[in-house]
Amino acid sequence: MGMNSRTLTAGAAGALLSLLLLGGHAGAAAPAAPAPAPAGTAVTLDVGDICYTDLPSEAHDTLDLIEQGGPFPYPQDGGVFYNREGLLPPQPTGYYHEYTVETPGSDDRGARRIVTGESYQEDYYTADHYASFDLVDYGC
């Protein structure tokens, strides 16, 4: 997969690092997002990781479509993901977007999704409709 246009600025990297290490708040959260942890409290996120090569082939197809800017198979693809579950790092509304990962044999969109953040290669995979997430590791 080639490079995509999402980049992480130095300021954003510092804000994200502060958020992850100190429990700080990086902007207005979505209405249903949980409150940030008090300053000095470690934030525990329920995000694992998955090697890009371990993703199902349909996830590779979705990531390729995202890279190309579409066209996407479902009208919901590219819509804002609100992180209501609170499993991803808190970010302002509009930071995350969701895309369908086709499920062979399913007669609907299925449960698999890619959720992208604004940072370079900040792609999360969920196989269970947002019950858990894995950050895609492009370096393994």
Image (cartoon, helix red, strand yellow):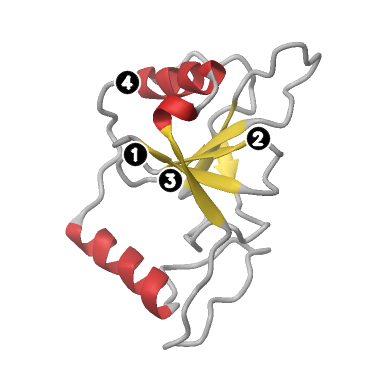
Q: Is residue 100 left or right of residue 48?
A: right
Q: Of the residues shown, which amino acid type is indicated by label 1?
A: Gln
Taking 73 as reference, is 19 above or below it?
below
**In this view, the mark in front (1 or 2):** 2
**Residue under label 3:** 117
Q: Residue at x 33, y 35 (%)?
A: 138
Q: Secondary structure at mark 1?
A: loop
The label on residue 127 is: 2
In the rendered view, does 102 fall on the left or right side of 71? Answer: right
Where residue 134 sits: x, y (%)? 52, 45
Q: Earlier in the sequence, mark 3 or mark 2?
A: 3
Q: CA distance from mark 4 to mark 1?
A: 11 Å
Tag 2, which secondary structure? loop
Quarter occupied by the C terminus: top left
Residue of label 1: 121
Describe the element under mark 3 as helix, strand or loop.
loop
